[in-house]
Amino acid sequence: MNEYFKIAWRNLWRNKKRTLITVASVFFAVFLALMMRSMQFGSYEIMEENTIKNTTGYIQIHQDGYWDDKTINNIFDDTGISESLDEMSNISMSIPRLESFALGSAGSSTKGIVVIGTDPEIESRASGLEKRVIEGEYLQKGDPGVLIVVNLAKFLKLGVGDTITLISQGYHGVTAAGIYPIRGIISFPSTAMNNKLLYMDLTQAQYLYGAPNMLTSISIMLHNPKKLASDTTAIREKIGPGYEIMEWKEMNPEVVQSIESDNISGMFMLGILYIVVGFGILGTMMMMTLERKREFGVMVSVGMQRHKLATIVFIETIYIALIGVISGIVAATPLMYYFHLNPIQLTGEAAKAMLDMNIEPIMPFSMDLPIYYNQAIVVLVLTCIAVLYPLIVIHRFKVLQAIRGH
């Protein structure tokens, strides 16, 4: 069997031009497929990462029915829940939040805003909120001050050190009102978020709304996202009935739909690429077979069995495919890695669409292993299909006609 591999390798380089043309078709197929899928999956990863970190986490716990009716009265007591979550090894952190609406006013200006009460330290570790401070300083635990978004600060004509008045309805109809100093101004990628958010310490929010120890949600981050489904089930069993446990995909259907539709269009484009490449490889195989038909006839006439000749040709084709696949991967990897570290900055409508979903308008490339072996497998399968033509010819050709060049 080793002799077959040696003969096949020598045969490749008897006609270098023919071999290089075939290798080039495989090379460009792998190179283009890797670049395209790496770019797509990289954009999916940044969409998922931004959505999970900035908004919902991997999993959220609410009072049953809260997601459909987000009112201050549809909240739950945190007694014992956070402690039970700390016992689960795959949970990296849980972020308690109390969210509601309020009227924010300063001077003669008033605007409806979303108030988010959270633990400043945990929130910073989970979503990187501290890095979004563009003026002033970040909140400390128990701090009576607040953070407001940049467009809200401009609308209300407020700066660091000024005060904002909040008026709302609290838990069970109590009046919620307070005056809070502004510790810092923050900025998000999303224009919508930059218009209406205010962050305060969780205990301050609970006091404002008359809801001690009450939460609207607990967002959960995981060490290993692959255990998302099993952890969701475990949390549901652990805390019992009366709560809704939701995964991030349930809470962000527009992001999931965007990824799925883009992936389908990407697979369609990839399919067209592979059809073109497949026919290119097949055409090269047909050309190679016609050029070598006399050679095949001579080899069979001197005693080589047809199945052995077919085996050698098959090995030659596998060599060509492997050379093309490996060279395509080697050429694509440095570019993929560069754009993985230095993402493409999006502009125009594409950037606006991502900003509207609170996603940073960049397009990094993914370095996930499945991208590599999926493309390699597809190209190898296409090559194996294309090699059927010379194998059929080898088993059917007439020796005398082949030697005479017919």
Image (cartoon, rainbow, N blue to C red):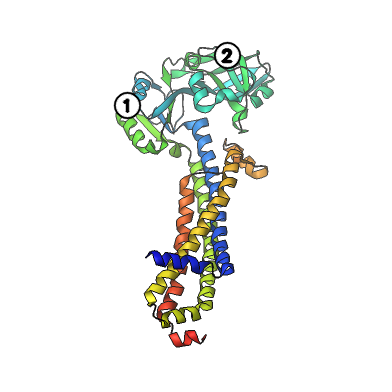
Circle 2 SS class: loop
- x and y, in percent, of residue 154 in the image: 69, 23
Q: Which mark is residue 214?
A: none
Mark 2 residue type: Gly
Q: Marks 2 and 1: in contact by CB < 8 Å?
A: no
Residue at the image point whose x is 55% and y is 51% from the top:
330
Circle 1 SS class: helix
| Label 1 – label 2 distance at C-alpha | 33 Å
Mark 1 residue type: Ile
Count of labels shown?
2
Q: Is residue 299 above or below residue 383?
A: below
Quarter that holds the N terminus? bottom left
Residue at the image point whose x is 50% and y is 24% from the top:
125
Residue at the image point whose x is 61% and y is 15% from the top:
183
Query: Could you tell whether 199 is left or right of 5 in the image?
Result: right
Name the residue beneath numbered marker 2. 145
Mark 1 neighbour class, 10 Å CA radius: few under 14, some 14 to 19, many 20 or more: some
Name the residue beneath numbered marker 1. 239
- x and y, in percent, of residue 389 in the image: 46, 74
- x and y, in percent, of residue 192 in the image: 60, 32
The answer to whether one can see residue 118 in this image is: no
Q: Earlier in the sequence, mark 1 or mark 2?
A: 2
* Closest to the observer, 73 or 245: 245
Residue at the image point whose x is 53% and y is 52% from the top:
329
Task: Kindly indicate the quadrant of the structure image that contains residue 167.
Answer: top right
Q: Is residue 309 above or below residue 30?
A: below
Q: Is residue 6 above or below residue 122?
A: below
- x and y, in percent, of residue 166 in the image: 57, 17
* Closest to the observer, 204 or 31: 31
